[in-house]
Image (cartoon, helix red, strand yellow):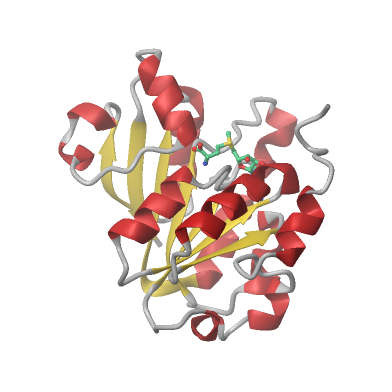
Amino acid sequence: MSLKNLPGAREEIEASPWAITEPEAWRGQWQSAFPEVHPLHVEIGMGKGQFLTQMAQAHPDVNYLGIEKFSSVLVRAVQKQEVLVLPNLRLIRMDAENLLSVFAEGEVARVYLNFSDPWPKERHAKRRLTSENFLRRYDVILAKEGQLEFKTDNRELFDFSLESVRDHGWRILAVTFDLHHSELAEGNIQTEYEERFAALGNPICKMICAP
Ligand code: SAM
């Protein structure tokens, strides 16, 4: 069975109060989707939700939204949240291509990209979540002091991303090529992929950048 086709996943997501089924309807008023008003942090390509559920537990003063394009993957995060019932976490099944239909100008305080798909072929470069194609979208939705944090073990994708961000006129606020042995390790919450690749001995790269 393909990972993209898990019977019942879409229905389970739609039935969950933690998944937002019509995200466009919340554009410009995401704060009303949460019980308390806090800065909004968004993870794009959240996978099964380990990072975001732990972040939401560690930082109750932040509202977290997780975005994932496949129901078969997102449903695992939904199931975690059904158990954890974190008031500051909501989940959306959507493609990041549609960010501008879902978030108003300056609505997002921080974007997290973790172990994003590398799309190694040059003709697919526009699909990389750190390509100019997406940086232009983040420019719109990020707040004035907004930031983007990106982690990956894929050095080629990381080097591409550093160049992409610089070429786009953004500032690199912090960078490491070995996160787990750097100052940035403090408070680091590992994603599913991060645990897997770090266990293989791969160094993890991280950058924090801002428009
Ligand atoms: N962030 C998780 C981690 O670090 O364990 C998952 C990493 S996985 C390699 C990348 C995830 O991003 C996949 O679940 C994929 O479906 C999702 N993804 C890729 N492109 C996306 C897009 N344009 N919009 C939403 N999700 C996307």
Where is the N terminus found, in terms of image quarters?
Answer: top right
Residue 159 visible in rendering: no
Is 100 located above or below residue 116 in the figure? below
Is 98 located above or below residue 129 in the figure? below
Percent across and percent down for residue 138 are 53, 62
Write the residue at 58% across / 46% down: 129
Q: Is residue 165 left or right of residue 130?
A: left
Q: Quadrant of residue 136?
A: bottom right
Q: Where ligand 1 lies, by image quadrant?
A: top right
Q: Quadrant of residue 92?
A: bottom right
Q: Nearer the viewer, residue 125 or 92?
A: 92
Write the residue at 21% across / 41% down: 184
Q: Nearer the viewer, residue 84 or 189?
A: 84
Q: How many marks?
A: 0
Percent across and percent down for residue 40 are 43, 71
Q: Quadrant of residue 30?
A: bottom right
Residue 170 visible in rendering: yes
Percent across and percent down for residue 39 are 38, 74
Write the residue at 75% across / 64% down: 14
Write the residue at 56% across / 86% down: 29
Percent across and percent down for residue 98 are 71, 63
Where is the C terminus found, in terms of image quarters?
Answer: bottom left
Residue furthest left as drawn? 183
